[in-house]
Image (cartoon, helix red, strand yellow):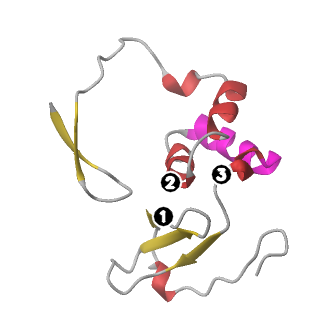
Amino acid sequence: MEQVSSSVTGELLEHEAPPSTPGLDWSQLPADLLICILGTLEIPDIFSSGVVCRSWHASYLEACRLGICSNNPGPCLVFSSSDRDPSVTTLHSLTTGKDHYVTMPDPPFRTRYIVGSSHGAV
């Protein structure tokens, strides 16, 4: 068993490491298949998949452009909480009540002014 820290919640998780497949290059996964998979993921997993490699990032951008990811729970409130690191952004789903935590690049999220809406929601 291997202990791994969740990038979303920070809690320690125990899992058995999957067997590695020599010579398998996940960056070569067909874009149409990856885009279909992205449409089924929750918010933290969508963000994470966009930073795996360049080809996955391109598929992530295409899925967002096509609105494929829009079937995920939403709307979300985006804010910085004083009890977390300044670079951590909280995404709070209004439909599920779940909080998702995303670490943003510098400058810290808490120092930014961000205003926006989606599909007329304010």
Considering the image in quadrants, where does the N terminus appear? top left
Q: Give, as a three-letter code, the residue at label 3.
A: Asn
**Residue that sits furthest to the front in the current view:** 96
Q: Give, as a three-letter code, the residue at label 2.
A: Pro
Q: Secondary structure at mark 2?
A: helix
Residue 116 image offset from top left, x and y in percent: 73, 78
Please give the residue where the numbered disc 3 appears in the rendered image. 72
Please give the residue where the numbered disc 2 appears in the rendered image. 44
- Residue at image location 60% in from the left, 70% down from the top: 94
Q: Is residue 11 left or right of residue 77?
A: left
Q: Earlier in the sequence, mark 3 or mark 1?
A: 3
Please give the residue where the numbered disc 1 appears in the rendered image. 98
**Residue that sits furthest to the left in the current view:** 1
* Front of the two marks 3 and 2: 3
Q: Earlier in the sequence, mark 1 or mark 2?
A: 2
Considering the image in quadrants, where does the C terminus appear? bottom right
